[in-house]
Amino acid sequence: MGRSPCCDENGLKKGPWTPEEDEKLVHYIQKHGHGSWRALPKLAGLNRCGKSCRLRWTNYLRPDIKRGKFSQEEEQTILHLHSILGNKWSAIASHLPGRTDNEIKNFWNTHLKKKLIQMGFDPMTHQPRTDLVSSLPYLLALANMTDLMHHPSLDEQALKLQAEAAQLAKLEYLHYLLQSTSSLTTDSYDQSANIANMEALNLLTSMSNVNENPVINCPQMDNASFFSNGIAGSQPLHHPNMLSQVSDPQVSFSTSQPCLNSEKNQDTNNNFTMVSEGDNIGNESSWMIPSPAPSVHPTVTGTSSNSNPGDASSRTSSYGGGTSFYWPELFFDDPIIHNA
DNA sequence: AAGAGGTCCAACCGCTCCGCA
DNA sequence: TTGCGGAGCGGTTGGACCTCT
């Protein structure tokens, strides 16, 4: 594009706005409306380009702008909308009254993006990260936390959290292994896929042996349902390649342990319902099931309800055909999806 | 107390989109 | 249909402020 920037003209001021400039701009717009942004600066007596005036107004001076920290609810909305819309900041902002696209973008870049990365999720796809080169150190650090579990000075709660973090790391690695084999065609399915599958199975075995995972150890989830079509909330673990190519008699899943935090039900229409009963659902430290939130999920159908939006302990969701996903922060009615 | 490094956010830049002639 | 200009969007920057050592 050969067009010269609008602010290149000599003499036009750039940089931070002074209170006097703000006052002039607000006064003019309140009296006349902004009309043509290009013409506005001259009419308002400002030595700025129209673009600069528009930005100042829309991002800072507009009377309906909500300032201050983002609420938990707003944060969830942003995460949710970003998983659907991506970096469409203006579209996201249109669903958050009083917030500007610039503000949301900044909040994303400084807080939410880092938060997702720290939790092992790709901030762009909202799925567990598979670029192990970059995430492996983090995963190993998490996994190594289990070494600390024998330290007598750490309290029980901390140990529990660490165990969950280690388990999360293992599950993420498992997801990576399964994804790596799923990309292979039938023709190219070879020894490397088998190796990955065996590694995945070893990982599964180790996880089931230590009875750490409330999902794997859930009594409602026997082998048949675990590997059946439409396992709600555990899609990364359901993998046709692995299951068809390898049947390891060593792999078994305990059914003797109580299902600590979740229940999985299936109705006659093959719809699944996940009832979360843990106190910590919605708290980032409780992500016991690292299943991916879909980057785009237009095929999601069914209903979702939240009897008490502020109370994470009563969230219920139901989707059809086993295409459901489990994304604890984001289990609420989605007008965007349904209206799309 | 001071300096280094990190964080936050307003503002800028370059590009695309869209309406109009 | 095409070219132009205005408006808007998303990425990036720079400086003020904060935190840590």
Image (spheres, coloured by chain):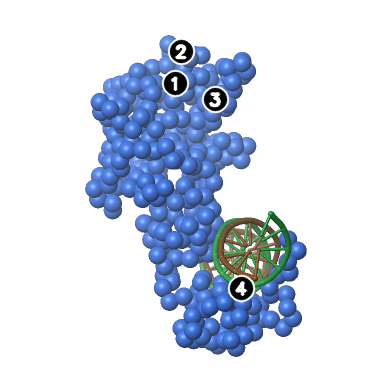
Chain colours: A blue, B brown, C green
Residue A259 in the image, given as x and y percentages of width and height: 29, 30
Q: Which residue is mark 4?
A: A51
**Which badge, 1 or 4, comes first in the chain's sequence?**
4
Query: Is the residue A116 above or below the residue A159 in the image?
Result: below
Q: Which residue is mark 3?
A: A182
Residue B2: image location, x then y, percent: 64, 73
Query: Could you tell me which residue is drawn at 54 percent across and 87 percent down?
Result: A24
Is residue A183 in sight in this rendering?
Answer: yes
- A231 sits left or right of B8 in the view: left
User: Sequence order check: which comes first, mark 3 or mark 4?
Assistant: 4
Q: Residue at x 24, y 48 (%)?
A: A307
Label 2: state its secondary structure: loop
Chain to which mark 2 belongs: A
Disc 1 to disc 4, C-alpha distance: 60 Å
The residue that mark 1 highlights is A205
Label of residue A248 in the image: 2
Sequence-wise, the earlier of marks 2 and 1 is 1
Q: Residue A184, how many percent across, how many down?
A: 59, 23
Mark 2 touches mark 1? (CB < 8 Å): yes
Q: Give the alpha-carbon distance from disc 3 to disc 1, as whole Å.
A: 20 Å
Q: Is residue A116 above or below residue A264?
A: below
The quadrant in which residue A265 appears is top left
Is residue A164 at least partly visible in the picture?
Answer: no
Q: Secondary structure at mark 4?
A: helix
Of the residues tagged 3 and 2, which is closer to the observer? 3
- Decide if residue A295 is on the left or right side of residue A330: right
Distance from Cα at disc 3 to Cα at disc 4: 49 Å
In three-dimensional space, the C-alpha distance between marks 4 and 2, rounded to whole angstroms, equals 65 Å
Q: Nearer the viewer, residue B7 or A14?
A: A14
Which amino acid, mark 1?
A: Thr
Q: Quadrant of residue A52?
A: bottom right
Q: Are marks 4 and 2 on the same chain?
A: yes
